[in-house]
Image: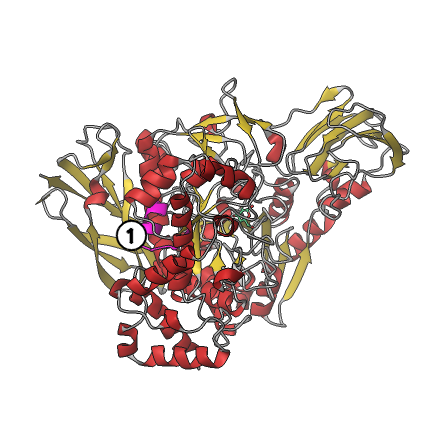
Amino acid sequence: MGIHAQVKCVSLLRVMRNLKPASTQSFLPFGSTFLLLVVFSCVLASSAQVLAQAPAPDSPAIEAKAHAMVAKLSLEQKIELLGGVEGMFTHASPAIDLPRFKMSDASVGVRTWGPTTAYAGGVALAASWDPELARKIGESLGRDARSRSVNFLLGPGVNIARSPIAGRNFEYLSEDPYLNSTVVVPYIEGVQSQGVIATVKHYALNNQEYNRHNVSSDIDERTMREIYLPAFEAAVTKGHVDAVMNSYNLINGVHATQNEFLNLKVLKGEWGFQGILMSDWDATYDPVGAANNGLDLEMPSPRFMNAKGLLPAVKDGSVKESTIDEKLMRLFRTELRYGFVDRPQFDPADSTYSVADRRVALDGALESITLLKNDGNLLPLNPAKIKTIAVIGPNAWPAVAGGGGSSESQAFEPVSTLTGIANLLGPNVHVLYTRGLPEMNDVFRRTTWDGLIQVATYPSKDFTGTPETATVTSIGDYRRERRGPPENGGPRSIRYTANYTAAKAGQYLVLAAYQSWGGSFKVIVDSKELPMPPHAEGLVPPFWTIDLKAGQKVNVVAECVQGNYGGTFGLGIAYEPDLVSPDVKTYAAAADVVVVAVGFTAATESEGSDRTFALPWGQDALIAAAAQANPHTIVMLTGGGGMDTRSWLSKVPALLHVYYPGQEGGTAIAEVLFGKHNPEGKLPVSFDRSWDENPSAAFYYPVKGADTTLHVIEPGHPPVDYVIPHVKYDDGLMVGYRYWTTTGKHPLYPFGFGLSYTTFSFANLQVPATAASGSTVPVSFDVTNAGKVAGAEVAQLYVSDPSAKSTRPERELKGFEKVRLTPGETKHVTLNLDARAFSYWDDKAHKWTIDPGKFVIRVGDSSENTPLHADLALN
Ligand code: BGC
C-alpha cells in the first residue's frame, strides 16, 4: 500500500468521529497481524461504504466494550492503570488483554525513540501564519510516530508567549490566542488523522520556566479566558484533541493536576473534553486531590495515584470507585476509538526517515524565516556578484534545529547555515567560516588560574559537616559530565576557591554555568557576591563583566548547592577583547558579504530554565567586530522570541529572525538570503528593545513576601513542605501587542511584522455598516502584489471595540489569511467574523459578552500597520 492510500485511510478517523457510524474495526482481534492490518487499511481506504460502518468515539460498541473492560478489573487492577510505566508508556493490563501504549515527545519531532525528522516547531510554525502548513507538519509527525509504534505524541504546546525570557516559548506558538488557536487545530487534526493521539500541553498558565514546579500563576478569570485558555479551548472543541497534559505549576494556589476549576469545570465541563487528561512528568502532588479533580493518568509513574494513596481513600469514601471507573472509561474509549487494542500501532506504510517529510520540514523553515531589516535592499543577494562570503558565529555551524529540554531532537542530517549557503552557492564561491567565539567549556578550561583551585565538598546542602577536599586546575566541564545523586544520600554543597591575576588592564568576562535541577550557586569576587539577575537560578548561563587593572589579583569563590540529582558547574574568566577570534575581522574584511549567525541554542534556551534577554556572552562583540570590518553584514538570530539588539542593530543593514527552523534551516536560510525564496514569515511575538519595556517585566517574578507553604504527602514517604512563590499576572490582558497598541507606544518590531522582497497593497475594504450581535460578519478586501517578484503576504484583521462597557485592548487579532501572489496579481479575501470575534469575558456574568455599539475593523500587514479600516455597528 502506498503512502497516499495510508494517509487517506488514517484520515478517515477524523471523518469517522463526525459520522458516528456502527463499529467494525474495534472487533478485530487484539494482536491482529500485519497482514490483517494491511488488508483492513486497504479496505477502508477504498470503500466509502466500509467507512460508513467504521467506529465512532462514542459508538455503542466502543462504549460497551470499554464498560466490559472496566467490569473485569478489581479495584487494585483499576488503580494500577492510572499511572505510567518506564517513563513513556501507559500501564498494561493482562487481565483484559490490554497492552501498554507508547508515548513520545514532541514539539519539533518524534524525538524519544532515536533520531527523527525535526520540523520548524512552535514559534517558527506560528511565524508562518499558515494553518495548512501546521496540518502538513501534524500529518508528518503522525506518520513519523506510527513508524515508531508511538500511540501518543506529547505535543503540541500552546502556552502563550507572555515574556521573551520564558525558556519554552520556542516550543509554544505565539503571544496571541487567536493565532495559537488557528494554528493548533489543523496541527492536531493532522497528527490524529494518522491514528496517533495528540496531547495539547501544558494546561495551563505555564508561562515561565523559572521554578516551574512550585510557582503559582495567580490570575483573574477574564485574563485567563481571553488570553491563556483559548488555544486549549480550540484544541478541544475544534481540534477534538484526545489528550491534554496538565502543567507543573499551580494556578491560583492549586496545582494544575488537581485544579477543579480548570479540569472539571472548564475542560471536561464547559468544553466537553472526552479524552485523557494526563499529568506532566512528576506534576502530581496529592492522590485524592488529583483523583477527584479530573486527572486521569499520572505520568511517568504512579507516585500518588497508586494503591497506597487510593485504596484507603476509596475505602473511606473520599474517592468514589465510580470516579476511578470514569478515568478508565476515558482511557479505554480513547484507545479503542483509535483501534490501539485491535491493531499494531506500527504501520509499515510509514517511513522512519522520509524524503517527503524533509520537504515538509523545508517548507516549515521557508515559511517562517522573518526578515526584520533590509536597509538599501541589501537582500536578496545576487550569487553572481559574490566571490567570497564569510559565515560567522556560534549558530552558523552546526545546525541549530531546536531548543533544549524534552523536545530536543536529534535530527537526521540537519543542514547548518554554513552548509546551506555553501550548497546553494556551489564550487565557485569562497566560503569562509569561523565560530568567532570560544565554546563555553573552552572558557572554563582555558582560564589560567593562579595555581591550583581548592575544592571542598560537603555532605550537606549548607556547607556543614566535614568536607572532602581536593585540588583541580580548572572549574567544571559543564554539560559533558553529569553527576548522579551522591551515594551517601542527599545533595552536596561544593565550594571552589581560586585566585586569578589579570594580565592586561580592561574588562573581563566572568562566565558561570550550573546545571542542577533545584540547585543554586553564587560567585564571590574579592568577598563581593556578583549580583545575580532576579531569580537567576534558572538563567543559563549568567555572565558578568568586571574591570581589572594589569597585574590585579582577585580571589574568586564559587559556592554551589546541588539539587536532588547532583549537578555540573563551570566557571571561567576571559579577557573580553580577546574573546572574539581575530579570524572574524580577517574573514569579514576579505568577504563581499558577511552572515553572522547568533542567538540561542539548546544549551542556552531550554525547558526547565528561563533565558536571558541579552544575547549569550560575547555575541554582541562578535557582531560589532564583523560589522566594523564589513558594512555588508547580515545578522541572523536564532531563538524563541525577541532579544537585545540595541548595541549593534544600527551598525548592520540586515536582520533575519529564524527562530528554530528545524533540520532544513540552513537550506531555507540560503534560499531566502539569495532570493530563491521570498521571505514570508511574520513575527508571532512583539520584538521588544529591552526586557524592561516588555509589559510582563514588572509582574513576571513572584511577589515578594507572598510565598505560601504547601504540605505534600507522597504515599509511603515522609511529608514535605514546598515553598510556593506567587506570580501575579497583573499585566492582565496587556500581553504583547495588546499593550503596545493600547498604550500607543511602539516595540522595536511589532507583532505580525515581516518584510518581503516585494510590496503589497491593501484596498477595497467591505464591511457591513450594521449587523446583529452574535451573527457572522463577512469582511472582505483586496490584497495586491505591487512589486516585481512573487511573494506571500499575511493579511491581518484586527477588531477594536471602542464602545465596550468594559476596558478592552485597543485591538485584537480576529482573522488572517496568507495570500500568495505573482507580481501585479490581486486577490479578494473574505474573512468571516463570528460572535467570539466581538466578545469579551464578562467577569461578573461569567460568560462571553458582546456590548452592542461601535466596532472598528482594521486590516493590514502587522498589528501596527493597518491601512484599511471601517466602522461596524452591532445592534
Ligand atoms: C515536559 C513535558 C514532556 C515530559 C515528557 C516534561 O518535563 O514538561 O513537556 O512531555 O517531560 O518528556
Q: Specify whether 194 is left or right of 568.
A: left
Disc 1 target residue: 816
Report whether the residue tagged 1 is closer than 8 Å to ligand 1: no
Q: Residue at x 34, y 44 (%)?
A: 267
Figure quadrant of residue 563: top right
Would residue 149 be found to the left or right of residue 752 on screen?
right
Q: Residue at x 38, y 43 (%)?
A: 751
203 lies left or right of 447: left
Q: Where's the C terminus, which quadrant?
A: top left
* Residue at the image point whose x is 44% and y is 47% from the top: 296
Residue 242 is covered by the magenta coloring: yes
Q: Nearer the viewer, residue 695 or 346?
A: 346
**Height in image: 252 above or below 65?**
above
Q: Look at the image and name its color scheme.
A: secondary structure
Percent x, y of residue 600:
58, 46
Q: Where does the image place residue 275, in percent across and percent down from the top left?
A: 38, 53
Q: Position of residue 119 (x, y in %)?
A: 50, 60
Residue type, label 1: Phe
Magenta highlight range: 230-243
Instruction: Answer yes or no: is residue 669 visible.
Output: no
Neighbor class of circle 1 (other Cα within 10 Å; few <14, some 14-19, many 20+) is many
Residue 851 drawn in magenta: no
Extreme top residue here?
705
Residue 178 visible at all: yes
Q: Quadrant of the N terminus?
A: bottom left
Q: Secondary structure at mark 1?
A: strand
Using the image as rendered, state which of residue 74 and residue 46 is in the foreground.
74
The x, y position of residue 682, in whole percent, is: 40, 51
